[in-house]
Image: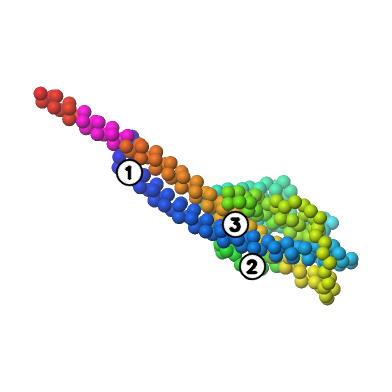
Amino acid sequence: MASLKDIKTRIGSTKKTKQITKAMEMVSAAKLNKAQGKAEAFQPYIEKIREVVVSIASGSDGVSHPMLEARDEIKKTAYIVITADKGLCGAYNSGLLRETLKLINKRHSSPDEYGIIVMGKVGRDFFKKRNMPIFQEIIGVADQPEYSDIKNIASTTVQMFEDGLFDEVYVHFNHFISAMSFQVTETKLLPLTDFDELVEPGEAKEAAPKSDYIYEPDAETILNQLLPHYAETLIFGALLDGKASEFGARMSAMRSATDNADNMIGELTLKYNRARQAAITQEINEIVSGASAQN
C-alpha cells in the first residue's frame, strides 16, 4: 500500500494538472468563440462568389478554362489536408488522418498516383513517418488565420493543376457542427465541373443558383481572374472551419481531462483518509497493547 506521503503527493500533482486543463479549456473556449464568428462571417462571401462563378460558367456558351475542364484520365490526385500544429484536442487530428489514409489506400495502389499538400505539424509528421509524398506543407498557421496565410499554397496548387501535375484536387478538413462535434469532410476543389455539388457540408443539395449579371469585359476574362480567387476562397473557408473544429475539440478534451482529474482527486482523497484512519487505529492498538503488557 502506498504511504500517506505518496498519496498526498499524487493529490497535489493532480490538483496542479487540473488547474492547467481548466485554464486550457477556458482559453480554447475564447478562441472557439472568435474562430466560429470568423467562419460564420466568411460564409456569405463564399456563397456569393460561388453564385457568381456558377452563373457565369454555366450561362456562357463556349467559355473554357483549365479549372473547369475534367480530365479524360485521372493519373494523379492531390489532397489538401488541414490538421493542427499540436495535439490535446481529442480525435480532431487522428480521425481526419485516419479517414484520409483510408481513402488514399482505397483509391490508389502507388504513391505515384497521388500527392499531399498538408497544413499543420501533426499532419506533416504523420505523412512523413509513412513516407507518403508531400508536395507542400504549412506549419505554424495562426489561431486566427488571415487570407494571406493560404494564398501562396492555393496559387501553387492551382498552378500545378493547370500544368497537368495533378488531374484533380480534394480538400480534407473537419467541418464544424457544434462546440461538441465535428465531421470529417472531403470537398472536391478542382476541376470545378459539377456545380450542383458546390454546397457546404450539411446543406441540402439544391439546384445551382441562377442570376442574371451584366458584366464586362467578356466572361472568359472574368473567369480567368475569378476562378483562382474562388479556389483560394474555398481553401480559406475550409481552414476557418477546421480552426473552429479544432478549438471545439480541444475545449471538450480539456473539459473531460478536468472532470477526470476531479474524479481522481476524490478517489485519492478517500484512499488517503482510509490509510490515515488505518494508521491511527494501528497506533491506538499498539498503545493499548503496550499498556496491557506493563500491567
Q: Residue furthest bottom?
A: 217
- The residue lying toward the viewer, choosing from 186 and 179, is 179
Whether residue 59 is visible to the viewer of this picture, yes or no, is yes
Name the spot of residue 91 as percent of width and height, x first: 58, 48
Count of labels in the image = 3
Give the residue type at disc 1. Answer: Lys
Segment tinted magenta in the rendering:
274-285
Give the residue type at disc 3. Answer: Ala
Can you tell which mark lies on residue 244?
A: 3
Give the residue type at disc 2. Answer: Tyr
Residue 280 among magenta residues:
yes
Mark 3 residue crowding within 10 angstroms, few (<14) / some (14–19) / many (20+): many
> Residue 258 vs residue 117: left or right?
left
Mark 2 residue crowding within 10 angstroms, few (<14) / some (14–19) / many (20+): some
Name the spot of residue 189 as percent of width and height, x first: 74, 59
Mark 3 element type: helix
Q: What separation in Å lies between label 3 and label 1 (alpha carbons)?
A: 39 Å
How would you classify the magenta stretch by its main secondary structure? Answer: helix
| CB atoms of marks 1 and 2 within 8 Å | no
- 122, above or below 156, in the image: above
Q: What separation in Å lies between label 1 and label 2 (alpha carbons)?
A: 51 Å
- 173, above or below 283, in the image: below
Whether residue 236 is visible to the viewer of this picture, yes or no, is no
Name the spot of residue 283 as percent of width and height, x first: 21, 32
Q: In the picture, residue 274 is in which quadrant?
A: top left
Mark 2 = which residue?
147
| CB atoms of marks 3 and 1 within 8 Å | no
Q: Earlier in the sequence, mark 1 or mark 2?
A: 1
Can you tell which mark lies on residue 109?
A: none
For image coordinates 33% across by 45% down, the residue present is 9
Q: Earlier in the sequence, mark 3 or mark 1?
A: 1
